[in-house]
Every structure is written in structure tokens, then in C-alpha cells.
Image: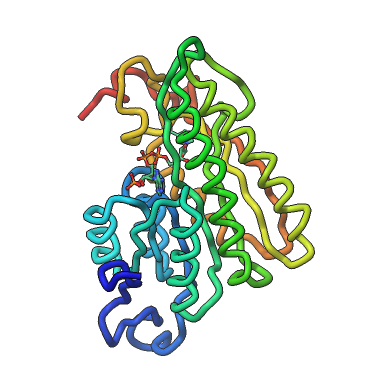
Amino acid sequence: MSAADAPREPAAGSAGTGADGAGAGVPKPLAVIAGASSGIGAAAARKLAAEGFHVHVAARRAEPLRELADAIGGSCTVADLSSEADAQRLAADVAQLGRAPKLAIYAAGVLEPTQIAGHPLDVWERTIAVNLTGGFLFARELLPLLTAGSRIVFTSSVSARKGARGLAAYSASKSGLDRFAEALQAEHERDGIGVHVLALGPVATPMLDRPGVSPFQLDADEVADVIAYLATLPPGVVMRDLQIRAATKGPFARDAARAEAP
Ligand SMILES: NC(=O)c1ccc[n+]([C@@H]2O[C@H](COP(=O)([O-])OP(=O)(O)OC[C@H]3O[C@@H](n4cnc5c(N)ncnc54)[C@H](OP(=O)(O)O)[C@@H]3O)[C@@H](O)[C@H]2O)c1
């Protein structure tokens, strides 16, 4: 591990412990978020830090990741989560923080809309590698650090249950992720590990920053609120599959004008 990629802890005096006063000296609960350099992962990092978590973030782009870690008083590992070695390095960095993650969130993902006719193999392989294999590596490497009451969260998609034009690789990867998560729950519910799969509808993040997508989009902060809520569940509550989308009808529907507003 290079020094630049070593876990970066908050400054002495606030090193992952409670705020000044009664909580001082008590370790903060730990959240680990893969795919936190933008979008949902970054929003979840900010939300959980505000809720009193020490947040360890990971993604490939060093600059936004380190800026986020500094802003929230967290720590980070620059890592490509489709790489087994990087997933192992992330887990080693998390182990150095010296406490079991309360939340382990796999929010890394890629979406490259492509028709099946002439679909480049590298786009297929990259999508499966990040969205599916990365989720498996993240869970496998962090499992030894989790304890009863820990929860693993995967950002899946409504596309996991409905193949759509241009989304063959994405849908297949998320469908595989859903079944992987089901197997993970089958193997580790007995250890008190919770598994959550967020079947998300469209969310306004850089991933959807292109023409032709639904105007009915959640904000990343709203998904972050759901993730923070999961941390508040009693440990005996099992809630694997959550379908989460923006309202499309009624007083809370988002219309095109709202979606396009600055
Ligand atoms: N936005 C939506 O409408 C929507 C809907 C359903 C599900 N989702 C899912 O929600 C998750 C978050 O997506 P988002 O909307 O927040 O998109 P985003 O803003 O593009 O964020 C994707 C994140 O994944 C990271 N990532 C990509 N490849 C990676 C790799 N090989 N290793 C480590 N990190 C990697 C990116 O960081 P780097 O580029 O720095 O590595 C980035 O932080 C994804 O799993 C996505 O499939 C999104």
C-alpha cells in the first residue's frame, strides 16, 4: 500500500471518537462506502457523517474521494473495486480502523447504455466486473470484519427485474447482484448480519446525466436518508428487498420542469 493510499484518519482529538463532551473517547460507529466519489455513495457519506458515523470511503478517483473524506472528517482508500487486490487492500485499511463496520455499503456501479447487436465485449465485462463481481469481492473481504448487528447494503436497480433496451449488461449485472445478496443473507443471517438490496428507480446523479432518461428522479440525498434509516433498525429486523422510486403521480410527483430546474 502506498502512503498516499493509506487510510486517512481525522485529526488528533477527533480521531473517530464521539464529539466533545459526553461522547468523547467513545468510538463512532463505522460506515464503509464503496463508490463514494460521487452520486449516491457521496450523499450517503455526508449523511452518515452528519449522523455521527466515522465514514471510510472508497472509489477510483483520488481527488474527489480525498476531498470528501477531508470534508466529513472520514478516511479513504483509493481503489478499483473490480480488482481483488484492491478489495483486499480496502478491507485491510478498514481493519486498521479497529472496529466492526455497522454499515458496509456497495454503491459502486457503471452504466454504459449499449444495444445487444454489436455490443462490445469490454463494455459487457466492465459492467459485470464493477456491478456484480465488485459487490461479491466487497462482501467477501469485509465479512470477516462484520459482527452481529452489521448491515450490508447494495445499490441495485429496478433494471434488475426488467430488461430494457440498451441496458442488457446493466440489467444482467444487477439481477446477478440481487441473487448474490439473497445467497449472502442465506449464509449469514445466522451471524446477525443484515443484507439490504435497494431496487432504485432513477436517481439524479452523474450516472443519469444524459438525454432521454425519466424526469421522475429521486435526489441522491433521499436515497442517503433511506440508507441512514437502515442503520436505525433493530438488529432482528430483516428487510432485504426495498423498492425505492420517486412519485410519478399526485402531489409529490416530480415533473419534467422540476427535474430540469437548476
Ligand atoms: N442513478 C440512478 O438512477 C441509479 C438507479 C439505480 C441504481 N443505481 C446504482 O446506484 C449506485 C451509485 O450510482 P450513482 O447513481 O451514484 O452514480 P455515480 O454518481 O456515477 O457514482 C458511481 C460511483 O461508482 C464508483 N465506481 C465506478 N466504478 C468503480 C470501480 N471500478 N471501483 C470503485 N468504484 C467505482 C464511481 O467512482 P470512481 O469513478 O471514482 O471509481 C462513483 O463513485 C450504482 O451501483 C448504480 O448502479 C443508480
Residue at the location (38% across, 78% down)?
Answer: 16
Above or below 148: residue 153: above
Q: Identify the image's colour scheme: rainbow, by chain, secondary structure or one colour.
A: rainbow
Q: Would residue 225 be found to the left or right of residue 6 on screen?
A: right
Residue 157, percent from left and from top = 54, 33
Q: Quadrant of ligand 1?
A: top left
Residue 31, percent from left and from top = 47, 65
Q: Would residue 107 be found to the left or right of residue 211 on screen?
A: right
User: In which quadrant will I find the N terminus?
Assistant: bottom left
Q: Would residue 13 be found to the left or right of residue 186 on screen?
A: left
Residue 52, percent from left and from top = 41, 70
Total numbered badges shown on the rendered structure: 0
Above or below 23: residue 102: above
Residue 46, percent from left and from top = 34, 57
Where, by quadrant of the figure, is residue 218 drawn?
top left
Above or below 248: residue 141: below
Return the residue found at the far top: 117
Residue at the location (39% across, 88% down)?
Answer: 24
Where, by quadrant of the figure, is residue 141 drawn?
bottom right
Q: Would residue 247 be found to the left or right of residue 73 on screen?
A: right
Residue at the location (52% across, 26% down)?
Answer: 169
Above or below 118: residue 195: below
User: In which quadrant will I find the C terminus?
Assistant: top left
Residue at the location (33% across, 51% down)?
Answer: 60
